[in-house]
Image: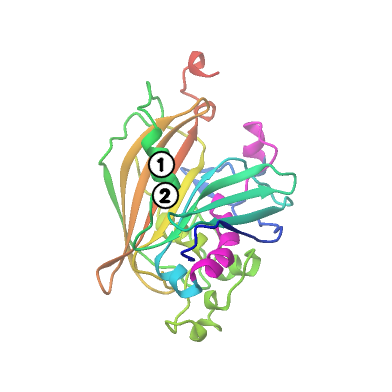
Amino acid sequence: MTSFDTEITLTGPLRSPAQMLQEQEYGGHHSVHDEATAGKLGLSGAPIEAPTHFSQFDPLAALAWGEQAWFERGCISCHFSTMVVEGEQVQASLTTSGSGPARLTAVKADGAVVLTGTAAVGPEYGETELETRRARQGPPSELFIIDQLEVGMTRDAGTVTVDHGTRNGSLYPFSLDEKVARITEPHPWYTADGAGSSPWGRAVLPMEMISVLAHKTPVQWPLRGPALGLFLDLEVRLVNGPVFVDQPYAIESEIVGMSESRRTESYWTRTTVTDVDTNTVTAVVLLHSGMFKESYAGYPADRLS
């Protein structure tokens, strides 16, 4: 990162992200990423999984800080504004400054904002997009879907590994190889053949796949349902990376906040990814999950607007 105060904007090309969650299931039902289910909520189509868009920032961050630094200590923190369906194109931009995190924006071809956020390389990450947003949120009013959650509640998801060829369960019904075959920004370090060319002599997970690792084992939070959910905000912070392919990691999640909007009740989880072999924290993933009020049959009709 330059020490000049002059802002510099890096802009990537328009890309066409792929939808890979059509077969996603949780709680015994399809998710909002299924066309028919999305239609019941009045959506224009099944949205692409939000972390997919993180990949379009990787080449820009590599230019700003270097590839090795980005995969070892990078942090991307984003608020998702508009859903993207397969067939739509997205363009990513990163604006650097002399101090503080870089600003991120992704827009559709028609200019609609897909996400906004921040990116930085640690150990001094600065105030991230999600830290700012969480500080602004007040307490929710009466809750009907997430009312059994409590801040400070924890869950241990056990030990998790992502390899090249195995699909990642019902939440992420695709393998790393299948993802890399359709990723918007391929890199040899993601592959078995290119692993030896990385500085660590091992294959690394793309930034968007770190969220898959952190959340692939379903966590049994006490949520009422069935109800449909989606990602509202996501931050992936590499503390002592990279996150390696074929490496076991211990996964532990904690409820760190609750909120609501006109259409959703939502909760924040902080998931810590710890290398089992070294017992060091490799990454921390902060996720803001929203549950559609109208998708829960038990939601009071007079509270829906």
Give the main secondary structure, helix, strand or loop, of the magenta stretch. Answer: helix
Provide residue 93's location: percent of width, then percent of height. 61, 55
Is residue 176 toward the left or the right of residue 225 in the image?
A: right
State which region is magenta. Answer: 36-65
The residue where tag 2 is placed is 128
User: Depth check: 250 or 238 in front?
Assistant: 238
Distance of label 2 from label 1 (alpha carbons)? 6 Å
Residue 49 can be seen, yes or no:
no
Q: Amino acid at mark 2?
A: Thr
Rendered view: 223 above or below 195: above
Q: Amino acid at mark 1?
A: Thr
Q: Residue furthest top?
A: 302
Q: At 38% across and 22% down in the image, what residue appears?
A: 141
Label disc, if present, on residue 132 of the rendered structure: 1
User: Depth check: 64 or 297 in front?
Assistant: 64
Q: Are marks 2 and 1 in contact (CB under 8 Å)?
A: yes
Q: Quadrant of the C terminus?
A: top right
Label disc, if present, on residue 169 of the rendered structure: none
Rendered view: 59 above or below 112: below
Is residue 205 toward the left or the right of residue 254 in the image?
A: right
Q: At 53% across and 66% down in the image, what residue appears?
A: 64
Is residue 132 toward the left or the right of residue 107 in the image?
A: left
Residue 52 is one of the magenta-drawn residues: yes
